[in-house]
Image: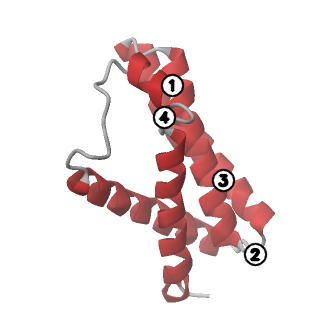
């Protein structure tokens, strides 16, 4: 299978990644805790969010594309195998990169867990979709 047949699943995975992030950082789940730990101002959806959402979606597309690329290269054909690839991509690249903020920049470990937990869930779901 070539990458041209992966475009629809890549777009779907990118959209779902955005939805996961929306709920993960919402006021119902980790939003208030994240805002306090990150010492960020409360970002309301009524403010201008067009540019950040556009760049976030582009980043989601790039992530989903490369997960699909790796899965295609590895011959992934099941949801479980896709999630396996997603977990190790997260562990090898995301978690190890984000922990440097805790080590070198004095970011709090709970903030690391919130941010990295969102990425773990996103990578598992996106990779599962792409592996199906």
| Identity of the residue drawn at 47% across and 14% down | 108
Q: Position of residue 19 (x, y in %)?
A: 51, 56
- Badge nearest the viewer, 2 or 3: 3
Asked if residue 74 can be seen in this view, the reply is no
Name the residue tied to disc 3. 124
Q: Quadrant of the N terminus?
A: bottom right
- Badge nearest the viewer, 4 or 2: 4
With 88 as the anchor, is 38 left or right in this view? left
- Badge nearest the viewer, 1 or 4: 4
Question: Which of marks 3 and 2 precedes in the sequence?
Answer: 2
State whether residue 108 is above or below residue 74.
Answer: above
State whether residue 110 is above or below residue 97.
Answer: above
| Identity of the residue drawn at 39% across and 24% down | 35
In depth, the one of 43 and 4 nearer the eye is 43
Q: CA distance from mark 1 to mark 3?
A: 18 Å
Name the residue tied to disc 1. 112
Q: Is the residue under label 4 in contact with that under label 1 (CB below 8 Å)?
A: no
| Identity of the residue drawn at 48% across and 39% down | 26
Name the residue tied to disc 2. 77
Question: Which of marks 2 and 4 precedes in the sequence?
Answer: 4
Name the residue tied to disc 4. 27
Q: CA distance from mark 2 to mark 3?
A: 15 Å
């Amino acid at each position: 299978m070539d990458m041209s047949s992966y475009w629809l699943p890549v777009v779907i995975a990118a959209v779902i990644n955005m939805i996961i992030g929306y709920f993960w950082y919402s006021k119902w789940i980790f939003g208030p805790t994240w805002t306090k730990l990150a010492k960020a101002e409360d970002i309301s959806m009524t403010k201008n969010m067009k540019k950040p959402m556009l760049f976030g979606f582009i980043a989601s597309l790039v992530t989903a594309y490369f997960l699909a690329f790796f899965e295609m290269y590895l011959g992934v054909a099941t949801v479980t195998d896709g999630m396996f690839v997603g977990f190790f991509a997260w562990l090898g690249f995301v978690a190890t990169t984000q922990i440097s903020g805790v080590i070198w920049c004095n970011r709090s470990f709970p903030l690391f867990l919130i941010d990295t937990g969102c990425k773990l869930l996103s990578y598992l779901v996106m990779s599962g979709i792409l592996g199906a």
